[in-house]
Every structure is written in C-alpha cells, then in structure tokens.
Amino acid sequence: MRIPPYLPYLAGPPSLAPGLAPIDTERWLVPDTEAAAWLPAKTVLMRTHRDLVFADTGIPAVIEELAGAVLAVTGMGEDIWESPLEMAAARVSDDFCLLMPNADGLWTLRAASLVAPTFWSLADKIGEPLTGLHGPVPNANPGLVNRIARMFDGLRPGHVLERFNWTVQAGSSRFTPSSEPLKAMARTAPEDAALELLHLRVERQTISKLPETGAVVFTIRVCIDPLSAALPDAAHRQAFEAAWDGIDPALADYKGWPDHDRLVRAALAQLA
C-alpha cells in the first residue's frame, strides 16, 4: 500500500478559499503520480463513454494550443483520437477544462475532457459561466465567483497556480458524476467495514493561461487512496480528525460528509 502523494488535510479542513500557490512550470503535469493506476481505465472510459466525459463547443485554436503544450511535456502517443484534446488527455492522468470569456466577458467552460468528475456532470456544466459552474457550492456567489474571475483576468501566461481539494468517499471509484451511490454505500455499510471501504479522495488542481489564445486551463488530477494509508500514525489521525470536525457545516453537507461520518468515526477508532 503506497503512501498517498498528497495529504491536504494536514493544512486543515476544506475551504471555499481558493488557496492557490504558484509552482514551477515544470511541475504542471509531472510527476504524474496517478498514471500507472488510472490511465488504462481512463482511456477505456474516454472511448466507451465519450458522450459523458468529453465536450467541445467549438474552440479549435484553443484545443490545438493546449494539446501542443501537453504533448511538449509527454511526447506523442500512438493512439488515434477524434479530438486533439482527447489525444492530450490520454497522455496524463489529469483532466482538462478550458475556459474562455463569453460575449459578456464572463469566463465560461468551453471544452473539457473530464473522466474523474467529483460529483458533477460535464453535460450539465459545459457552456456555463463561473456563476453556473459554482452554483451548487454553498455561499459561492457572488463573492467567490468574483474572486475567481479577477484571478483569471490577472493570470499571466507562464505562471501555474496549484491548489488541493479533498474529501472522503466510500469505495475507490474515480468516475463519480454523482455522489448519491457513494453516500448510499456509506449509509448502509457495517462499521467493521469502514477501513476497507473508506478512501481519501484528493483533487490536485492547477490553473494556467495559454499565451496565444488567452484561454484558462484548469487541470484536475484525482488521487484515490485507502483512508488507512493516509493515516499512518497518531499525529496524522489527530490532524485528520481536527480537519474533519473543523469544516463549515454547510460545506460538509455539500460534500456528503454527514453520510460518511459514522464510518469515519469507526475507522478512527479502529486505527487508534
């Protein structure tokens, strides 16, 4: 069992604050910690469920620019894909979302390869501005959306920003457009199955801007690890419990934490 590559609970509970930090451009896509575990299954889903995981509203220049940037890092593959965006997405474990300003100047989701969605549907969000993308997030509008829009406006090409989001889920699935099956699993599972069932789900996100088209590239790398592997000792367990208990109640409800709380408490007790 590996040590998870990221343990963002050590920094406290999830928050609506963007929490973005600059990173070296060389770290944009590498090292790809999830390639071995996820890429084979990801590419299968890309071919068998294309209507669910791919969308393009017609921005060929942006897609070509992104594909060139990705392939400059990864090298060309031998597989044939319908879109250069899919060709790029098949080379890394990360998902890609491309945003451009609409006629009203609002940053809008224009294309995406999204194979590991954390409880949202690409079909529901494609073509939506930031207000629509963050609509379900508690207290996101207008404050958070305005902050993100200003950050997109001011972002300079050549800079990469990184942030982490995390939750706990029942099971190890990465393709989760809906949280309902996971919440149902958590509600009905016996407590003695907690350590087997619960997983830490971490989203490693980056934001950057393409120099030629000015599009914003939002990448999402989902890491799934057993919760037991993420809590190797008492110090980690204490930090996790403090983060679990310290989240804003509205955000906890949004993430489905009340449905998992019983199993989380059982897992912590079993690890003590």
Image (cartoon, rainbow, N blue to C red):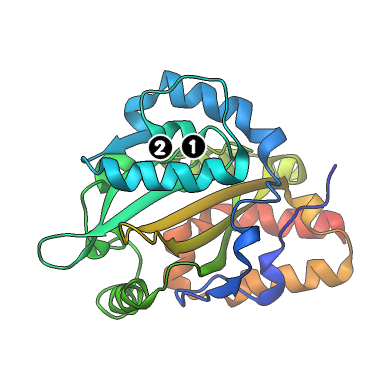
Which of 29/53 is in front?
29
For the N terminus, the quadrant is top right
Task: Return the x and y of residue 222 as percentages of the image width and height.
Answer: 58, 48
Instruction: Name the image quarter holding residue 59.
Output: top left
Count neighbours of disc 2 (C-alpha within 10 A) and say few if under 14, some if 14 to 19, many if 20 or more.
many
Which residue position is annotated with label 1? 88
Instruction: Locate residue 133 relative to residue 9 in the image: left or right.
Output: left
For the point 71% across and 50% down, which residue is it?
31
Instruction: Locate residue 194 relative to residue 213 in the image: left or right.
Output: right
Instruction: Locate residue 18 relative to residue 216 in the image: left or right.
Output: right
| Label 2 residue SS | helix
User: Quick check: can you spot residue 95?
Assistant: yes
Q: Amino acid at mark 1?
A: Ala
For the point 49% across and 37% down, which residue is it?
89
Count neighbours of disc 1 (C-alpha within 10 A) and say few if under 14, some if 14 to 19, many if 20 or more.
many
Which residue position is annotated with label 2? 85
Task: Return the x and y of residue 36 as percentages of the image width and height.
Answer: 71, 34
Label 2 with label 1: CB-CB less than 8 Å: yes
